[in-house]
Amino acid sequence: MFRSHVINKYLSKEFLKVVLNISLTFLCLGFVMDLFEEINFFKDYNVGFAVPMLLAALFVPSLFYNMFPFVILLSGIWFFLKIKRTDEIIGMQVAGMSNFSIIIVPSILSLLLGIIFITGINPITSVLIKKYENVKGSYEIDKDYLAAITENGIWIKERKDNKNTLIRSTSLEGQNLTQVTIYEFNENNDFVRRIESKTANIKSTTWILKDVKVYSNVGDLVYEQDESLPYVSIYDIKKIRALYKNLDTISFWKLEDEIKILQERGYSTREMRAKLQRSIAFPFFLLSMLLLSGVFTLGFQLKENNWRYIFVAIIASVLIYFFNDFSTVLGKTEKLPLEVSVWMPILIIFIFSTVGVIHANQK
């Protein structure tokens, strides 16, 4: 028992050391690659070098979080190769440990890392990526056009003809905004008038307002129209529904609250629910990737050629990425149930890896 405890402690230490080294490599590469992208974005701005570096530092943690399953795959391959090259695996087998016993320690650690990433790291990366969008958005050409969904309703800011407009709606029902209020300001941001409408059809950028009342800047009713009234905006139903395009800004702990808000506002919650399912499945995804790395290294003999293992890892990562992405698309287009589209790739990898581990354990 004592011998087993010492070996398990050693395996844990060595595996975490490999994960740390590969993680630092990914972070450095990601930082350099994104830094070049940010520099290219700011080539027409006089911002110096500090802003691109700040943005790269804010963006890379989120990128690393999304790539962490492949970090685990490479870490597992590197770890198992290490104990094979040094013949440590032979010593462990002589001590009575099977291949399964050797794989189980990094497997448990991968599962625990997944839980830590979801519950602790994800909230941090969501704050950083939100800060990233705010900083970078302040330099966007169309920064005068903003839209957001909050607990108080749907808010839209526009600028056209040197006038600023602030639009608020209670909810979205089909293609109609309900209880719409439009506040118009002149070029000096002085309040000009307020338009109220029970509904606004936003199928196109030319909205059709129904039951319209127009008030002056002092609150006097100056116009009332029961029939339809056109209002030109830069937003239509497609743009409004795309407000939550970057789900990385939403923390795991806030997903359920955001889903409730979307439901109350009449928005589709499909992508948000898919995000929740992917977050719950994340630890099991890491576990599957670790088991897969064990299959590649302990289940097959490639004559100890590290480049072949690296080639296999890259091919596997590409195939898993596209398979996962394809399954997600099927879920978004409702070709598959949402839960199936998220869990199916993980279950397939897990089943394949489990069978491979059983086969490796018999060697």
Image (spheres, rainbow, N blue to C red):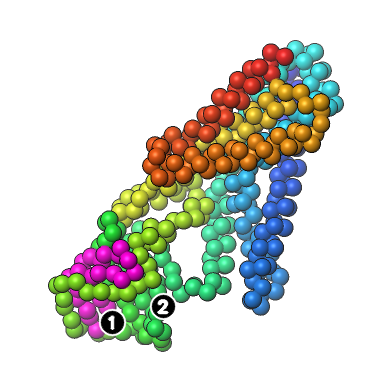
Q: Nearer the viewer, residue 93 or 310?
A: 310
Which of the two residues, 344 or 138, is positioned nearer the viewer here?
344
Amino acid at dot 1:
Arg
Task: Name the quadrant containing residue 77.
Answer: top right
Query: Which region of the structure is painted magenta?
Result: 194-216
Q: Position of residue 182 (x, y in %)?
A: 30, 74
Residue behind mark 1: 193
Q: Is residue 92 above or below residue 118?
A: above
Relative vertical location of residue 149 with respect to residue 294 in this rendering, above or below? below
Q: Name the residue under label 2.
A: 159
Q: Main secondary structure of the magenta part?
A: strand
Looking at the image, the residue that sits furthest to the bottom is 188
Element on which disc 1 rests:
strand
Question: Element type at marker 2?
Answer: strand
Point out the image quarter for the N terminus.
top right
Residue 136 visible in this rendered orientation of the protein: yes
Q: Which corner quadrant holds the C terminus?
A: top right
For the residue carrying disc 1, how many other residues have a C-alpha within 10 Å: few (<14), some (14-19), or many (20+)? some
